[in-house]
Amino acid sequence: MRVRATVGYDGTDFSGFQRQANAWTVQEALETALGRVSGEMVAVIAAGRTDAGVHASGQVIAFDTRWRHAIGSLERALNAVLPSSVAVRGLEPVEGSFHPRYDAISRAYRYSIYNDAVRCPVETRYSLHVAHRLDVEGMQGAANYLVGEHDLATFGRSPREGGATVRRVMQAAWTANGPRLTFQIEANAFLYRMVRSIVGTLIEVGRGAMSVDDFVAAFASRDRAKSGPSVLPHGLFLFGVTY
Amino acid sequence: MRVRATVGYDGTDFSGFQRQANAWTVQEALETALGRVSGEMVAVIAAGRTDAGVHASGQVIAFDTRWRHAIGSLERALNAVLPSSVAVRGLEPVEGSFHPRYDAISRAYRYSIYNDAVRCPVETRYSLHVAHRLDVEGMQGAANYLVGEHDLATFGRSPREGGATVRRVMQAAWTANGPRLTFQIEANAFLYRMVRSIVGTLIEVGRGAMSVDDFVAAFASRDRAKSGPSVLPHGLFLFGVTY
């Protein structure tokens, strides 16, 4: 049977989701745990191939297994053998045709910033420290232009060689809670490094190095060199996938 | 001059605040940084001596220095040499009589719980995972009895040998945001391990192992053996001190 599951992970010590030779990845952690629990060689497919250092609370995966016991006992067995930095939840049997990447309607990411003159040690692991005071209204003003169907080539390249760079963005919203700024972006799909490139460019707007007009011109240029520098991965979370 | 500062730290890798032989403490990190920056042997006093593994966003310290430059440059110099797990902010000169512990009117702590059947890897570092569904209303009903001036001997011993165990609690409030439960408690002062013992006992109420009446009887007994088991330190934050 094919099983769907939601996966959370702390990406700090992983070289991203996708299996690689000579690097510790989330996919390998999951496949190793499935192998130990089921005795099978199990291949895992995910909705999004997150980069090294990126976290997830709502990654979605699927795999095929001949597991004959209750699905709840598979979930408990997996969580018992997975490292503490990975956990699975909501395991359920699905149609054999279900594909977590091709069937997804949209993905949602969050990027967290701690905006204060002094860094905060308990925020360091999951948010980017920006000492320069950011103008959140300006960043939202620029982010509003992202919503809709656009060519986003300024902010990333297609995961497929020569692939299209048009994507549909449903939401691009900043929220502020004291020094904690969060950018939430939902799109049908994402280009490689897109969220980190967009956040880096919006920070240029927030600190006054780019105007909203500069942002709009960079966006329209479809020139990767016109984006701001990409931000570090540790503030980024894949938090949900919609089917 | 005497200088007051607010300190944040990730307590994970520290053996608590107070200096000890053969253990890495926040006090030693601060005094080492002050020594490097000022060239003096500087002793640091804190508002609260947090235990091993306990975090802080609003610890308050004071120290004496002959620093002759701007106070802002002392703050920047300290943050440049402190480990990433400690940061100081809001440095200001104060009266030579200021004492961060004796002059404090109250301290406020927060304890975080992640209450879901499955652990969440990105919550693990700063909150306790409790798989059993907790009754937050019941826990609040019991916590209400803590507010006021009471003998809290059930929940801890005095930091001084044979010292009094009466303390005045101003606030003891649970808030829930999905699976994230936070307990905020403010008191004029705290007994040794008091917050962790109270939270552990309230969890017994929350999972139905103790009734609110049982909690009230345990509280009234002033018997340390009647409390629930103390919770782990990693969910605890010292977040503010009032003067």
Image (cartoon, coloured by chain):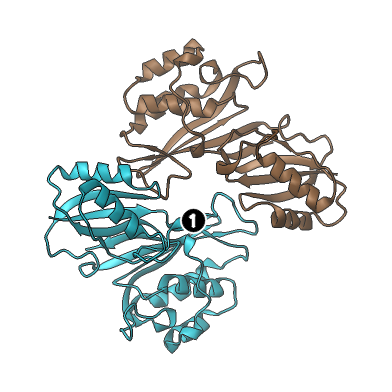
Chain colours: A brown, B cyan
Q: Is residue B128 left or right of residue B19?
A: right
Q: Would you place residue A52 above or below residue A69 in this image?
A: above
Picture quadrant where residue A216 is located: top left
Percent of width and height locating residue B90: 24, 49
Q: Would you place residue A58 above or below residue A196 in this image?
A: below
Disc 1 is placed on an element classified as: loop
Characterize the local packing of mark 1: few (<14), some (14-19) or many (20 or more) Cα atoms within 10 angstroms: many
Q: Is residue A114 left or right of residue A164?
A: left
User: Could you tell me if residue B121 is visible in this image?
Assistant: yes
Tally the marks.
Answer: 1
What residue is rendered at 48% in x and 61% in y?
Answer: B235
Percent of width and height locating residue B213: 51, 83
Amino acid under disc 1:
Tyr
Q: Quadrant where the C terminus of chain B lies?
A: bottom left
Task: State which chain disc 1 sits on.
Answer: B
What residue is rendered at 39% in x and 80% in y?
Answer: B157
Residue corresponding to mark 1: B126
Q: Is residue B215 left or right of residue A43?
A: left
User: Could you tell me if residue B213 is visible in this image?
Assistant: no
Percent of width and height locating residue A196: 50, 29
Percent of width and height locating residue B130: 58, 63
Q: Quadrant where the N terminus of chain B lies?
A: bottom left
| Depth order, front residue of B234/A184 | B234
What residue is rendered at 52% in x and 66% in y?
Answer: B136
